[in-house]
């Protein structure tokens, strides 16, 4: 895929004085949903501020859809950014805030009104749109910022902790919205601490720690590369004890545990391919009724835990 | 979108925001002399045209230019960008598809329009009240050179707002605590009369002085310290102040281009 369709970081570093923001980041993000995952201070917001032109790299180059990050006019047209700064100009209502922003985009009055209504509707804020933002709850303010980022129909949507302050229903709606936008070919870049929800929608994950990219790619591929932590597989079957006895004989199997409900096994293996071959052989030989086999730690949460550690705030 | 359209869009947005109870102090500064002149008109008798002319010009030169407009511009222009940083809203502007120079020029022009309208109206009201309350003054207004005086007074207001506005806007971008250089500037402008002739050229007041329609006599002890410098020709004062404003705004634009949104460090 050409750089005109990607967000590209080439050896990008950002220092705030002597404090490291991110260091030597090289990434090429395709369209779809990309999640930036990492503890506080890992560099997620710095990466987002860099790709939206709010800050400049100390070293290296980056481009967004082929645009240099200092091309503020074109970036402003094609990128929407929902920051985590929970602040608004004084006295605005939800509608006037979004409408005023579209005025800066040079939209004609009628079009600006239509786009404002559309964005407010997408985030479920139509009914409260004419109330002062100062009277909104945290979740409502979050949704208005999201409406602002969406309102000019950007090609790249950058969302810094977009699920913060939202109730479970609103979170589910937002995730569905992000998936819908990604389905339309948009870049949706999300940072979040809510790993299990991000995991559900992400096409691509970037794991960050202390300003460095620890791993990136599709989460399954990233998990496969984490070789120092054996893969964990969940096997659902009708005779778990018999299957466990068979699997124990294999060298690559590190641990086998009977599932607490007694209807399956949790197997830790160093070689997933060998495990599957072994499992097939046992099932054919013993006629065990196999219901399901699935990776048990092939998700962002597990990979995060393995690569970044447990002393973080991930939930 | 033409180059001026984003400037206009920012200006409109800024002007809409500016109209609130928070700008009441600006009106208070602009209209305080009107209240005092009204009290003077009611309480005092035996007004003479010469005396009233000296008073109104004294108010313009010493109150409006050195105090009202100076501190009005200080309060308003320092907050144009610094206020956005303090309230953490600057990123909304930076994320809009508008060149940063256009953002700054739009904000600056909105500030100029606001201060010129407010202080211009204040000067106009002071002028009308001062001359309108006695027959000789009314005759001066309708048949004398009052309108020519008023035109020059309003030109002074415009140029003072441009000059001080540009300087304070630049201060807000160049200094973390712009109040310190602003206080130093207030001191510098205040002692302009006693500075050596060549140093007088480095102030806004000096270039405004030849535009005042009436020269005020310097009397008392103050006259011992006052250094009289050759006045600048009017055309040079006007064009010089406009050129100075353009240069300072250009410098501010240059700084604006480099600003990064990192509120924690501001």
Image: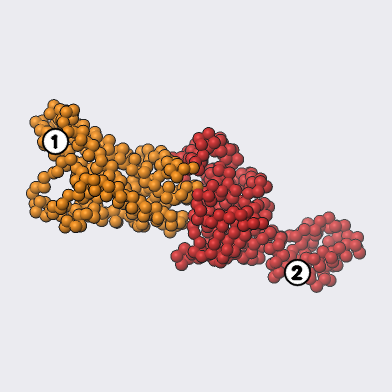
Tell which of B134 and A7 is nearer to you.
Answer: A7
Q: Give the position of the C terminus of chain B as an image quadrant.
A: bottom left
- Residue at mark 1: B52
The outermost residue toward the bottom is: A251
Tell which of B237 and A223 is nearer to you.
Answer: B237
Q: CA distance from mark 2 to mark 1?
A: 98 Å
Tell which of B203 and A143 is nearer to you.
Answer: B203
Q: Chain of mark 2?
A: A
Task: Residue B148: tell me if it is visible.
Answer: yes
Tell which of B86 and B63 is nearer to you.
Answer: B63
Q: Chain of mark 1?
A: B
Tell me the number on the disc at residue A270.
2
Circle 1 packing at 10 Å, graded few (<14), some (14-19), many (20+), is some
Please tell me which residue is depicted at 61% across the width and 65% down the height of the picture.
A214
Residue A247 horizontal/vertical position (percent): 83, 67
Which tint was used for chain B?
orange
SS for callout 1: helix
Please tell me which residue is depicted at 18% across the width and 28% down the height of the picture.
B142
Which tint was used for chain A?
red
């Amino acid at each position: 895929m050409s750089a005109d369709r990607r967000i590209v970081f080439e050896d990008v570093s950002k220092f705030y004085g002597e404090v490291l923001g991110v260091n030597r980041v090289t990434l090429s993000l395709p369209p779809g949903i990309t999640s930036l995952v990492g503890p506080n201070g890992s560099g997620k917001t710095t990466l987002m501020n860099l790709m939206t032109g709010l800050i400049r790299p100390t070293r290296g180059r980056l481009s967004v859809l082929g645009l240099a990050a200092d091309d503020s006019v074109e970036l402003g047209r094609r990128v929407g950014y929902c920051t985590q700064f929970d602040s608004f100009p004084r006295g605005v209502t939800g509608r006037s805030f979004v409408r005023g922003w579209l005025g800066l985009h040079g939209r004609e009055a009628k079009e600006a009104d239509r786009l404002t209504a559309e964005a407010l509707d997408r985030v479920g804020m139509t009914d409260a749109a004419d109330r002062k933002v100062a009277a909104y709850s945290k979740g409502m303010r979050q949704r208005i910022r999201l409406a602002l980022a969406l309102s000019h129909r950007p090609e790249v949507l950058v969302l810094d902790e977009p699920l913060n302050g939202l109730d479970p229903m609103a979170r589910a709606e937002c995730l569905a919205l992000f998936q819908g936008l990604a389905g339309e070919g948009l870049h949706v870049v999300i940072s979040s601490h809510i790993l299990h929800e991000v995991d559900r929608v992400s096409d691509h994950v970037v794991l960050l720690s202390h300003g460095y990219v620890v791993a990136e790619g599709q989460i399954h591929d990233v998990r496969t590369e984490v070789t120092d932590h054996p893969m964990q597989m969940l096997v659902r079957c009708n005779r778990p004890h018999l299957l466990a006895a068979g699997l124990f004989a294999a060298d690559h199997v590190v641990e086998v545990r009977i599932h607490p409900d007694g209807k399956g096994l949790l197997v830790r293996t160093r070689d997933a391919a060998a495990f599957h071959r072994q499992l097939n052989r046992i099932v054919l030989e013993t006629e065990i009724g196999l219901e399901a086999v699935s990776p048990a730690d092939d998700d962002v949460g597990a990979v995060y835990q393995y690569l970044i550690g447990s002393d973080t705030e991930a939930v | 979108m033409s180059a001026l359209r984003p400037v206009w869009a920012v200006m409109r947005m800024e002007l809409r925001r500016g109209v609130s109870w928070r700008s009441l102090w600006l009106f208070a500064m602009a209209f305080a002399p009107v209240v005092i002149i009204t009290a003077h008109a009611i309480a005092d008798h035996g007004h003479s045209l010469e005396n009233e002319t000296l008073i109104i010009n004294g108010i313009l030169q010493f109150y409006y230019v050195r105090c009202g407009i100076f501190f009005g511009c200080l309060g308003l222009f320092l907050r144009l960008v610094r206020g956005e940083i303090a309230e953490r809203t600057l990123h909304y502007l930076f994320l809009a598809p508008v060149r940063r120079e256009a953002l700054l020029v739009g904000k600056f022009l909105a500030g100029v329009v606001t201060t010129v309208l407010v202080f211009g109206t204040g000067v106009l009201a002071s002028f009308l009240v001062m001359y309108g309350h006695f027959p000789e003054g009314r005759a001066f207004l309708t048949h004398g050179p009052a309108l020519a005086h008023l035109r020059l007074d309003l030109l002074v207001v415009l140029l003072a707002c441009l000059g001080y506005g540009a300087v304070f806007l630049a201060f807000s971008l160049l200094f973390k605590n712009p109040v310190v250089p602003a206080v130093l500037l207030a001191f510098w402008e205040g002692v302009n009369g006693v500075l050596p002739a060549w140093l007088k050229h480095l102030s806004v007041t000096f270039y405004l002085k030849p535009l005042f329609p009436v020269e005020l006599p310097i009397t008392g002890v103050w006259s011992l310290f006052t250094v009289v410098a050759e006045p600048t020709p009017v055309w040079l004062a006007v064009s010089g102040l406009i050129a100075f404003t353009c240069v300072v705004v250009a410098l501010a634009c240059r700084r604006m281009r480099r600003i990064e949104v990192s509120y924690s460090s501001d």
